[in-house]
Amino acid sequence: MTIRHHASDESLLRYAAGQLPAGPARVLAVHLATCPCCRERLAAFEAVGGALLEATAPAPMAPDAFAAALRAIDREEAARAPATPAPTHLEARARPRAPVTLPGGIPLPAPLQDCEIGPWRWIGLGVRASTVRLPEDPEARLTLLRVGPGRKLPEHGHVGTEFTQVISGSFSDGFGRYGPGDLSEMDQEIEHQPIVDREGDCYCLAALEGSMRLNGFFGRLVQPFVRL
Amino acid sequence: MTRLMKDDGVPDGDELARLIGQVATERDRQAYARLYSYFAPRLNAFLRRSGLPPNTAEEIAQEVMLSVWRKASYFDPARAGAATWIFTIARNLRIDHLRRLRTASAGEEEPVEVETAPSGETLLLTAEREARVREALKTLSDEQATVLRLSFFSEKAHSEIARELGLPLGTVKSRVRLALGRLRVLLEGHT
């Protein structure tokens, strides 16, 4: 997978800081899972966080805070003592559920495996959509889109940034061609008109920070799904 | 508490990593005490600064330090420095806390992380990366440092930060770009 379109500095910085809303953060997580280059940049931005933490002038904890921490540790150790040893790293990560796939047998990206994928609904013009619910934030706005080959989405704009990660297939807009693993971040005030390439369906994961311009086509398209 | 103050020298990154290692392998409470006295008050201040009320900031700082005890064996110096690792724990617990407030639903979901095989080389690079990030931060102008800090301590998008500072969005974006550009030169320039 050759990735040509990467996360922006702003988004990676906000992701590193834990300041990106849940929906866009998941889209980024899907991108990061397949993009070593963005993982490397993320590590640098997290190191900024570490440096800022160390540079922060300390604010004293309550005088008995450390003693309380030791008591909490004692309680945990006592509760754990007779039990089996803690699971290893790998066991802790194992997920018992069978992996979820998208229609056509396309595997759902690993960072979405704990999400609830809603039913696919036909919403016109060769476009189907499914709402993705995040366990940690049911209000997050996250949508899987399946767009037929050669389909054109009328130009749309938005208030805030639209994050679109290609899972399979490809589309093109005035800014280039986006294939599997590519991330498109469309800033506010940018109008674009994605066209899905002829080879086949395009599956992508989309999240919006802010709100879609309501008069835009895409806004009306996903409105029922993102509860604008 | 007083015995914690015996050693008031500020530990460096290697020392902090070694202390976490001792907590992991020996469950060493002396090492933990040193980590606690160094990090807990900084976490407390850091979390307040990111907008949490003082009581909550202290509770979460305490939670972070308990996680450091529990998860010390997960610390991998090939992936991040000690302060960076602890920062990411604080970041995740803060996110969990804010989401619990919003959704009133519990859940200890770990963020999805990708395994990378540590090697001698990545270990060296990680240490260098941490050192270079610090160097780079020192060279930022006040204006660049301000927008970088705002990105860390507020959930606002850059467009909102711009509005708040009374600056055009382009100015905020270019300051962030310059700040990050300087980081990048230092991170990539020597490899």
Image (cartoon, coloured by chain):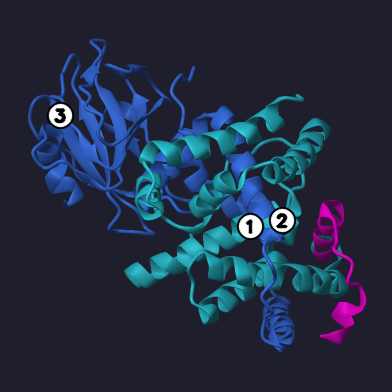
Region of the chain picked out in magenta, as a range: B1-23
Residue A109 makes an appearance in the image: no
Residue A179 highlighted magenta (yes or no): no
Disc 1: CA contacts within 10 A as few (<14), some (14-19) or many (>=20): many
Q: Which residue is mark 1?
A: B87
> Any mark on residue B100, and which?
none
Disc 3: CA contacts within 10 A as few (<14), some (14-19) or many (>=20): many
Disc 2: CA contacts within 10 A as few (<14), some (14-19) or many (>=20): many
Q: Are marks 2 and 1 in contact (CB under 8 Å)?
A: yes
Give percent across and percent down for residue A100: 36, 40
Give percent across and percent down for residue B129: 73, 38
Structural distance between the alpha carbons of marks 1 and 3: 42 Å
* Name of the residue lying farthest toward the top: A198
Q: Is residue B113 above or below residue A156?
A: below
* Name of the residue lying farthest toward the bottom: A64
Which chain did the renderer colour blue?
Answer: A
Structural distance between the alpha carbons of marks 2 and 1: 6 Å
> What chain does badge 2 belong to?
B
Q: Nearer the viewer, residue A144 or A207?
A: A207
Q: Which residue is mark 3?
A: A127
